[in-house]
C-alpha cells in the first residue's frame, strides 16, 4: 500500500514540509534553524543563481566578496540599520577553544575579542567602509557590485527555505553621483527581479513600494515584488532599496564632483535569497509532489525504458541515444534512466514527485509502432507521439508547460485580489477568501498597526501601477490617495 501524504487542503504547512523532504530538496541540520540543501534542491538554486547572475552582468554589475564578520561598531554607525537588525544578530566574542581539566572542549576565557564581531545579517556597513577607500572623485562612480553569500539572522521560528537562521542570497550594493541615478538603479533591479520571477519562475508578482514601517532598516524607499501562494498568503520575493545618503554619511563617503565640490554618495542595495525556492514550491506544486517550470528544472525530460531482457533494452537504448543527443543540442536537459534496480512504476512516481516537466516512456510495442508515450507533469496528460517528430514535440511541450504554469498562477492571483470599502468587508474577505485585499489606507502607522494587530494582515505593498483615486480609509474614514494591498504573509 502506498504511503499517504498530507494534502494542501488538509494542512498546507505540513504538506509543504513533507514535500521539501519527499522531493529531496533540503533537510534540517543539527544546528538549530539551519538547513542542509541537498543536491537536487541545490541544482534548482544553481539554475536560479546562474540566470540572475547573467542578468546582473548584463546590467553592468560585477561580482565581489566581502567579509563574513562585521565589527560591532560598524552597525552602530547607522541608527535605523542597527535597530532593524539588533534582535537577529549572531555575535562572535572569543577566538579560541581549550580543554578543561576533564578534557572537555570549552571557550578559552583569555581569548576574548577586543571588539565583538557580528556574523553578517546584511553587508551594507562593511561594504560602505570599503567604498570609503574606493571613492574619491566622480570618475570613480558609479560602483555596481553584487555579492553571492550566506547571511545569518537569528530566527526563532524557522521553516526550510522560507525562514532559516542561515540562508543563501545575493546582495547588490551600488554607489552613485546623483539621487536620480540611484533611484533609477533601485527601480531597474526591481524590474530585473520581476522579469526573472515571471519569465523563469512562472510566478506572477506585484511590483510596488513598502509602507514606511515595512521599509528596510536604513532605507528611504524599499521597492518589492510580492507573490501570492496557493494558500492565499503573500510572500515577499525580492526587494530593492534606495538608501539615499544615509550610509555615505555614516561612513563619510564623499566624492569631488566636476566642479570640485565634495558631495556625499547616493546608494542602493537589493537582494533575493533561497526564499525563492519556497516561493517556487508553493506557487506550482500539487498533492502528488513538486511541479517545476521547465526553465528551472534540473532535469527537463526523463526517459524511462520498459523492457524484458537485455536485447530489448539494447534496442531501446540505441533508439533513445539519438533523441537524447537531439534534445541536448536544443539546450534541453535529459536523463535516460536505464537503472535496472528500479521498476518503471517507481521511476514514474519519483519523477512526478521531483517535478520533472516531461516524462517519456518507451517499450517494445512502442518501438514496433514507431511511437512513445509522453506525459506532462503540470496537467498529467499523456500522449502517444510519433517518434520521428518527438524532439520537436517535446521542445514545444516544454514551452507550453512554462506558459500554462504562469497562466494558472496568474488566474489564481486574479481571483484572489478583492477590493473592499469597509473594515467589515476587509475582515470578511480575509477570513473567507484570503489573498490580496485592495483597500484605502490613511497613510498612518497607527492605522497600519491596528489592522495588523487585529487581523495579522500587513500592507504588502503600494503597487507601482495603482490607480490614483481619492477614497476613505477603511478604519478612520480619513482621505486616502489610492488603494494599497494587504495580505497575511510568510
Image (spheres, rainbow, N blue to C red):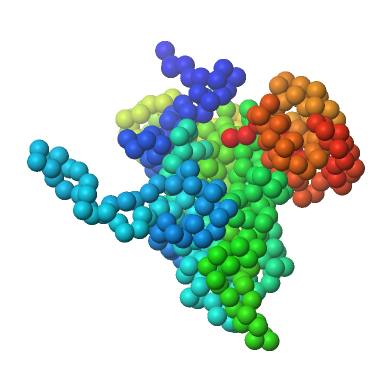
Compared with residue 315, is residue 3 higher up or lower down, i.e. above or below? above
The answer to whether residue 22 shows anywhere in this view is yes
Q: Which quadrant of the structure image shows residue 306?
A: top left
Expressed as whole percent of the image width and height from the top left, the position of residue 402 reads 63, 42
Q: In front: 184, or 454?
A: 454
Tell me the residue at 70%/64% (across/down): 184
The answer to whether residue 298 shows anywhere in this view is no
Q: In front: 173, or 329?
A: 173
Tell me the residue at 65%/44% (across/down): 214
Expressed as whole percent of the image width and height from the top left, the position of residue 115 reads 35, 58
Q: In front: 488, or 372?
A: 488
**Residue at the right extreme?**
470
Expressed as whole percent of the image width and height from the top left, the position of residue 171 reads 52, 57
Tell me the residue at 55%/55% (across/down): 79
**Residue at the top extreme?**
1
Expressed as whole percent of the image width and height from the top left, the position of residue 384 reads 59, 32
Amino acid at each position: 500500500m502506498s504511503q499517504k501524504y498530507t494534502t494542501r487542503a488538509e494542512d498546507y504547512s505540513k504538506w509543504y514540509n513533507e514535500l521539501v523532504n519527499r522531493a529531496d530538496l533540503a533537510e534540517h541540520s543539527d544546528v538549530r534553524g539551519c538547513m542542509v540543501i541537498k543536491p537536487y534542491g541545490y541544482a534548482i538554486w544553481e539554475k536560479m543563481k546562474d540566470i540572475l547572475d547573467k542578468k546582473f552582468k548584463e546590467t553592468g554589475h560585477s561580482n565581489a566578496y566581502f567579509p563574513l564578520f562585521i565589527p560591532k561598531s560598524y552597525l552602530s554607525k547607522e541608527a535605523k540599520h542597527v535597530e532593524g537588525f539588533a534582535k537577529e544578530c549572531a555575535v562572535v566574542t572569543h577566538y579560541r577553544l581549550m580543554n578543561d581539566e576533564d578534557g572537555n572542549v570549552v571557550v578559552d576565557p583569555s581569548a576574548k575579542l577586543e571588539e565583538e564581531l557580528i556574523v553578517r545579517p546584511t553587508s551594507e556597513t562593511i561594504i560602505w567602509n570599503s567604498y570609503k577607500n574606493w571613492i574619491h572623485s566622480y570618475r570613480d562612480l558609479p560602483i555596481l557590485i553584487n555579492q553571492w553569500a550566506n547571511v545569518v539572522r537569528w530566527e526563532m521560528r524557522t521553516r526550510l527555505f522560507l525562514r532559516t537562521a542561515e540562508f543563501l542570497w545575493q546582495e547588490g550594493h551600488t554607489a552613485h553621483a546623483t539621487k536620480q541615478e540611484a533611484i533609477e538603479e533601485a527601480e531597474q533591479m526591481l524590474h530585473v527581479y520581476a522579469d526573472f520571477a515571471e519569465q523563469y519562475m512562472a510566478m506572477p508578482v506585484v511590483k510596488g513600494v513598502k509602507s514606511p514601517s515595512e521599509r528596510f532598516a536604513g532605507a528611504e524607499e524599499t521597492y518589492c515584488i510580492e507573490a501570492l501562494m496557493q494558500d492565499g498568503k503573500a510572500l515577499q520575493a525580492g526587494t530593492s532599496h534606495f538608501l539615499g545618503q544615509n550610509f555615505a554619511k555614516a561612513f563619510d563617503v564623499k566624492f569631488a564632483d566636476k566642479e570640485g565640490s565634495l558631495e556625499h554618495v547616493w546608494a542602493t542595495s537589493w537582494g533575493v535569497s533561497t526564499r525563492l525556492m519556497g516561493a517556487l514550491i508553493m506557487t506550482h506544486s500539487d498533492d502528488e509532489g513538486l511541479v517545476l517550470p521547465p526553465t528551472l528544472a534540473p532535469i527537463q525530460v526523463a526517459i524511462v525504458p520498459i523492457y524484458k531482457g537485455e536485447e530489448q533494452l539494447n534496442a531501446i537504448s540505441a533508439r533513445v541515444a539519438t533523441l537524447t543527443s537531439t534534445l541536448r543540442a536544443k539546450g534541453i536537459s535529459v536523463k535516460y534512466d536505464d537503472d535496472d534496480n528500479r521498476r518503471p512504476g517507481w521511476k514514474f512516481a519519483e519523477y512526478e514527485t521531483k517535478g520533472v516537466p516531461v516524462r517519456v516512456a518507451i517499450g517494445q510495442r512502442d518501438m514496433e509502432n514507431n511511437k512513445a508515450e509522453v506525459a506532462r507533469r503540470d496537467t498529467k496528460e499523456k500522449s502517444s507521439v510519433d517518434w520521428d517528430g518527438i524532439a520537436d514535440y517535446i521542445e514545444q511541450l516544454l514551452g507550453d508547460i512554462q506558459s500554462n504554469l504562469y497562466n494558472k498562477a496568474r488566474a489564481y492571483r486574479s481571483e484572489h485580489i478583492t477590493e473592499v470599502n469597509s473594515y467589515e468587508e476587509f475582515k470578511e474577505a480575509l477570513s473567507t477568501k484570503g489573498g490580496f485585499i485592495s483597500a484605502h489606507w490613511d497613510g498612518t502607522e497607527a492605522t497600519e498597526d491596528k489592522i495588523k494587530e487585529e487581523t495579522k494582515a500587513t500592507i504588502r505593498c503600494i503597487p507601482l501601477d495603482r490607480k490614483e483615486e481619492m477614497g476613505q480609509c477603511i478604519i478612520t474614514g480619513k482621505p486616502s490617495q489610492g488603494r494599497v494591498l494587504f495580505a497575511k504573509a510568510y
